[in-house]
Image: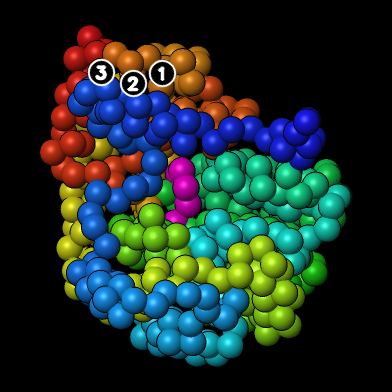
Amino acid sequence: MRPSRRSAVEPFHAMDVLAEATRRRAAGHDVISMAVGQPVHPAPRAALDAARRALEQGRIGYTDALGLLSLREALAAHYRQAHGVAVDPARIVVTTGSSAGFNLAFLSLFDPGDRVAIARPGYPAYRNILSALGVETVEIEAGPENGFTLTPESLAAAQAQTGRLAGVLLASPANPTGTVTGRAQLAALSRYCSDNGIAFISDEIYHGLTFAGEETTALELTDDVVVINSFSKYYCMTGWRVGWMVLPEAMVRPVERIAQSLYISAPELSQIAATAALASGEELDLYCDAYRANRELLGRRLPELGFSIASPMDGAFYAYCDVGRFTNDSMDFARRMLSGINVAATPGLDFDPLEGHRTMRFSYAGSYKEMSEAMERIAGWLR
């Protein structure tokens, strides 16, 4: 038996690093993982209580492919309260994490041979999923000259060079850079996509984790957008595998048809817990205060150690660093750091196939004690 050509995508190196860190921890090593965006905090108390009550009742089953109506209505209320936007619950689809949301968006919007623009550096799963589906990824460098985000000008230049784009995918706050795309920039990007018949996907999974700049949902600007979000990051529910999409009305049924066959539905238990989590803002904002302290620590200590911050740490919970002073092989650097001092971080090759050999991403989603200890270990290792 032979694997298909479409399966020959690049590995997600962050997950490989996490797996090795897990093996070392199981072998008795005191590992600090800064490799993945895994919040150290548990799911909100209300979510845990709701899940316990559901388990005590004993019956957890399938839901509609679009998700529990109660959760979709609660999400619509969230958009009203947080953003002043009226969203029909019928346009909301509950997904098995944001990963399923991306699969559904790509399958319902694009055909093999289409071109989709993403920022470079950017989240590697975009590139890998699109590649597996036969869709060409057009990576546009997002650096200081364009505010570390996509712009109409950079999209126009890409189209002139590669041909017509079928889609544009933007994350704000972004992974790994932390870039927050402001309202005016987001509006300009949305207008460009609309004027040029380009599908616009807005990845908003780090909403709630904005420390500088304007946090704007694309839904404040247009209904002609696919918004993808998740309970994994701000809500600290990574392992519950529950997220959501907001779709233009015409896209709901196509997405529903695909979801019925691929996933049946997101786990009902996770949907019940997620509904309760939406009312936990006070508790979750305390967690954000902890990330803010970690952000200040890394923003100070990493440059002191010789790692220059490659882009402003405005949102999410990552520091993306230039480590070229120490290595021209970020993969080897990550392996040596893990084996030498039991600190795991992600090589930049995950996010930037061209320049990632000299960059690293450090997640500061752990505890302040862990972050402090990691910085001290790295300082001793580099001496």
Label 3's element?
A: helix
Q: Is tag 3's residue or tag 1's residue first in the polypeptide sequence? A: 1
Instruction: Determine which quarter of the picture holds residue 187.
Output: bottom right
Residue 27 is one of the magenta-drawn residues: no
Residue at 24% from the left image edge and 13% from the top image edge: 381
> Mark 3 sits on what residue?
341
How far apart in space, not on screen, are marks 3 and 1 (Cα)?
10 Å
| Residue 8 spot, x, y in % from top left | 72, 33
Task: Report which residue position mark 2 lands on.
Answer: 338
Question: Could you tell me which secondary element the residue under label 2 belongs to?
Answer: helix
Q: From the top left corner, tell me how far across and down residue 225 is, in percent.
A: 64, 73
Above or below, comparing residue 32 to residue 47 in the picture:
above
Q: Residue furthest left?
A: 369
Name which residue type carries label 1: Arg
Residue 174 in magenta?
yes
Q: What label does residue 335 carry, if any?
A: 1
Label 3 – label 2 distance at C-alpha? 6 Å
For label 3, the crowd category at 10 Å Cα-Cα, with few meaning under 14, some 14 to 19 and many 20 or more, is: some
Amino acid on which disc 3 is placed: Ile
Q: What amino acid type should be assigned to the residue bearing mark 2?
A: Leu
State the residue in front, 286 or 243: 243
Q: Are marks 2 and 1 in contact (CB under 8 Å)?
A: yes
Characterize the local packing of mark 1: few (<14), some (14-19) or many (20 or more) Cα atoms within 10 angstroms.
Answer: some
The magenta stretch is 173-177
Q: CA distance from mark 2 to mark 1?
A: 5 Å
Q: Position of residue 209 (x, y in %)?
A: 34, 59
Q: Secondary structure at mark 1?
A: helix
